[in-house]
Image: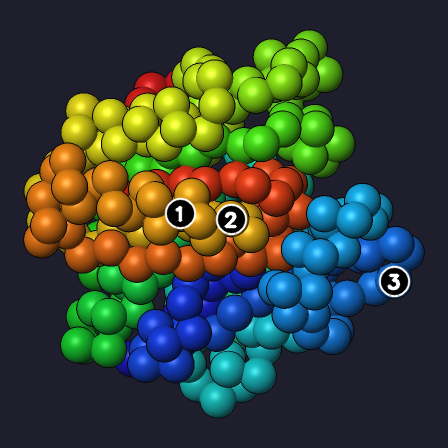
Amino acid sequence: MSIIFSDSGCDISEDIINKYNIKIIKIPICIDDEDYSKQDISLEEFYKKLRAGADIKTSSINPNIYMEYFEPYLKEGNDIIYVHFSSGVSGTFNFLKDAINTLKEKYPERKIDSIDTLNLTTGSGLLAYEVAKRNYEGMPHKELVVWANQNKNEYSVYFYVDSLKHLKKGGRISAATAVVGSMLQIKPLIHCADNGKLKILGKAIGRKKALAELVNYVKKYGKNILDHPMVIMHADDIVNAEELKKMLLEEISPNLKIRVQLVGTTIGTHCGPGTVAVVFHGKQLVA
């Protein structure tokens, strides 16, 4: 078996991480000038600080840090597949290729591959899960890489944010684009498109209509959704996340396999509190 890596931007649940022995690379965050790259913070405390207006930023991983994660496993004779969130929204992967090239020179007998999911949060995490599951079941390394690249557009992420200010602050959207979300009660509706970049699809007035739009996206773009897991992600808004789950079960099927989960620190930093997303097996829109 290969060693499967992913990162904190993929929001993989602890039970899946533990069951399939997925190694997680932590994207560094800094909170009010305090470095949290080598220390843990609970999501409860993270969102408390975010809502209180703390200055929270993520930072890139340099090649040496990637090598610190990978090299111990290569020394043991393992091959590596790293399934990561979209390079279209983060510069942290600019250094990944350098690290892999250096390690390939040092360990020419080892296979080291990265899969750019061109997706976010559990849209990436579900692919990592599928890769890890197949790895556990014995699929060879080369076949895993081919399968992952052929299927990485099979999960879609649609979400709304309470405000576009966090996406603007992190440089994920332009200042001009952010104007659409500045009006009271306007909930911008966003999708991670097939080029891995964020695409604003429209806006809804109020959370109720925004939730209804998320349900409509599942109805319109879902594919074989009863055969695949569905995840509702929320950034410290369990009430509306549970409401979305209720709506999906009532309006689509009571047999949907839905998990409700908190958005982690990496994506939460940029989407901001109050975000609600639905991740499902279905069509990614063309950018």
Q: Is residue 183 above or below residue 72?
A: above
Whether pointer 1 and pointer 3 mark residues with C-beta atoms closer than 8 Å, the reply is no
Report, in whole angstroms, how far the alpha carbon at label 1 lies from the one at label 3.
31 Å
Q: Amino acid at mark 3?
A: Glu
* Screen quadrant of the C terminus: top left
Examine the rendering and report whether any part of residue 174 can be seen: yes
In the picture, measured across the screen, residue 126 lies left or right of residue 275, that is left
User: Which mark's residue is nearer the viewer, 2 or 3?
Assistant: 2
Whether pointer 2 and pointer 1 mark residues with C-beta atoms closer than 8 Å, the reply is yes
Q: Is residue 74 above or below residue 153?
A: below
Circle 1 SS class: helix
Whether pointer 2 and pointer 3 mark residues with C-beta atoms closer than 8 Å, the reply is no
Q: Residues within 10 Å of mark 2 (few under 14, many from 20)?
A: some
Q: Is residue 254 above or below residue 80?
A: above
Residue drawn at (25%, 46%) of the image: 246
Q: Which mark is residue 237?
A: 2
Q: How many marks?
A: 3
Q: Amino acid at mark 1?
A: Ala
* Screen quadrant of the N terminus: bottom left
